[in-house]
Amino acid sequence: KVTLILGLLNNRVPIRLMNELLLAAAEDDAVPPVLVSRLASQLKNRTLNDLRSQQFSQLIHVLRAKKDKNQSKYVNALVSSPLKEELWKPPFESKFVWRDKKKNVVATQTEGLFLQENSLLGWALSPSPLDSALVPPSKAHLTEAGSKEWDHLTRATRGRVEGLQRGLQTKLTSSQDQAAEFVDIILRAGDEPRMAVLEWLGAIITTAEPRGKQGQPAPEGFNFWPQYGNHVIDCLNQQEPGAFERSMKNLLLLQALHARLQGFPTSGMALNAFTLLLHLLKPIKPEQASTVSAFFPVRDDVPQLLGNYHKEARFGEKEQIEAATASAKSDPACTTALSDKSLFKSQIFWLTTKGVGYLLMPVAKESFHAWQNLASAMYDKDREISDGATREFMLAEAALKESRFLERLGHLVDLTFRFLQHAAAGGQQALPPPAPGPSWHVMPSSVLENVLELCDLYRDRERKKTAGGIPTGLFIHVDPDPVLTTLCIVMASEDHVRDPSLRGRAVKLLHRLCFAFRSWRDKLNHPPLDKQLIPCLVNVFIAVEKAIMSYYDLSYRYKYELRVPVMDLFDLTLQTEGHREVLDQFIKGDGNDKFLK
């Protein structure tokens, strides 16, 4: 039966007839696992220039086959034994451990790269232009990094580079669309298949955690992005000509070797997985941000999806977090079974939120910071390294600034700021900030830190303070109101955020966005900011100044950097009579007491 169906799939059989044949064949319980296994095995070693589109379409056609609204037997076969162990999530055995001086195990190899290379969803997500170091030398010419058309881009015209990037984006979005269609079919097939997808994505994000943490700088380690790539530049400048590490190709090879030893997914795989999460997040409308549960990460069984995310630092004090966690036990997000469909919205939001820090940001910072700086620093010293860094930057930029990716990323940023505003205000009026409640006390601080860093990374750095243009890139898709309101809550309230450096980062972002986009700047003269911005600026200025000799001691230089945006915003707002009146009233009331303290 399987051989006959495979033969028919390779011929032009009417779709309706093919569906009837597939449904009839599925009545034999032995057929679905064998047929799915035969089709899936053809997708192993997919690449961006060999997507196996015909074979992928055949697999999609088979997985779609179901009678009425019944569950697909082919999908159920994929996430059940024996295919679950063979194709979906093969059992992993760690082969490397790291020990301290006392011989205690401090780290073990994880399953990220193993899933990337040995599971069906890994094959669906792996095609990428960023992972050429994994390709054998005999096939290097088949990758973008190994092709002549992507070589010597430092001497190419911008038109030629943009043409190459557009062609790459077409191939990349085609591959990502195939993976999204495949995952959508599985998610709609029932509770067990849906949980299988979520657990697989959770495992990939968890294994990528080393890439998102400070430390392990290249070339000794695997992260190029720490210190904006300056450590790599210093090491290259000290290397003798001809040294193994004085080569862009070899640096990427070392990173790939670390990925194999440590077990984290490669950059291209991480970015494709994050793109899939953005696709799954898209149906959540902005006005539904308040329905996402802030208590979901404190569930006892959340490590099944989010790994160690429950150990993240939170905004509340220890007693506040314990009280909030106790009160969350009665929340539906904590009492409902993890496999319940009603939790899917919160599950996807938190997976995507964690993915920002561990899947997206390492790749984006590597591109926008390390590769750009490395290409510039080595341009006159070693043109081959400069060309290689430029090529890697252009390849990553094609994926990170693709129009649909930016639209969905903007949706995530907008949703995150709305969610933070609702959690900070507890559903009440946001400004002036009310006392934080349990939903804010259990909020991981990395949610705010990552979205601030993401916005700063994507803002147009070439824009002058006086440009006053229209929003561009990512910010076309972001509503300024929840962003500005949330930033003002962070700036104004010590009860919400105690770290003055984080509050300073909020005012720096507000300053940059308002001076870059005139429409955002005009919002400062409309409710509620026309009455609340001045107190927010005073509060954040005092917080930064009083950080000396405290737990959050800030260096003098960093304090100076935080003073400048506050002074610029004061200079801008106090040109308006309304803001001057607010300042006059504030310094005669609550503001006077704050200054005296």
Image (cartoon, rainbow, N blue to C red):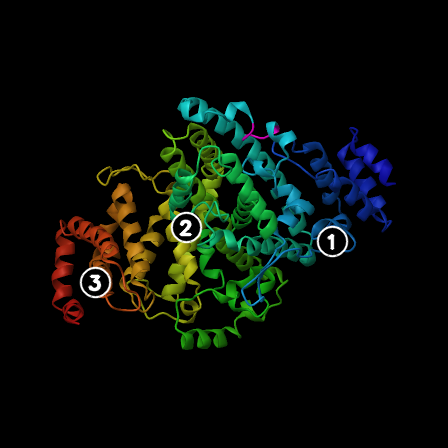
Give the residue pinned by disc 3. 545
- Residue position for label 2: 414
Mark 2, residues whose alpha carbon is within 10 Å: few (<14), some, or many (≥20)? many
Q: Which residues are magenta?
A: 142-146
By secondary structure, the bulk of the magenta-drawn segment is best described as loop
Mark 2 vs 1, N-terminal side:
1
Spatial CA distance of label 2 from label 1 is 37 Å
Res. 112 mark:
none
Q: Quadrant of residue 182?
A: top right
**Distance between the alpha carbons at the discs numbered 3 and 1:** 57 Å
Residue named by callout 1: 84
Residue occupying image coordinates x 46% and y 76%: 322
State the residue at coordinates (78%, 55%).
Answer: 81
Residue 430 as seen in the image, left or right of residue 338? left
Q: In the rendered image, is residue 263 in sight?
A: no
Q: Amino acid at mark 1?
A: Lys
Q: Position of residue 31 (x, y in %)?
A: 84, 46
Q: Nearer the viewer, mark 3 or mark 1?
A: 3
Task: Identify the residue at the far front of this view.
Answer: 240
- Residue 445 seen in render: yes
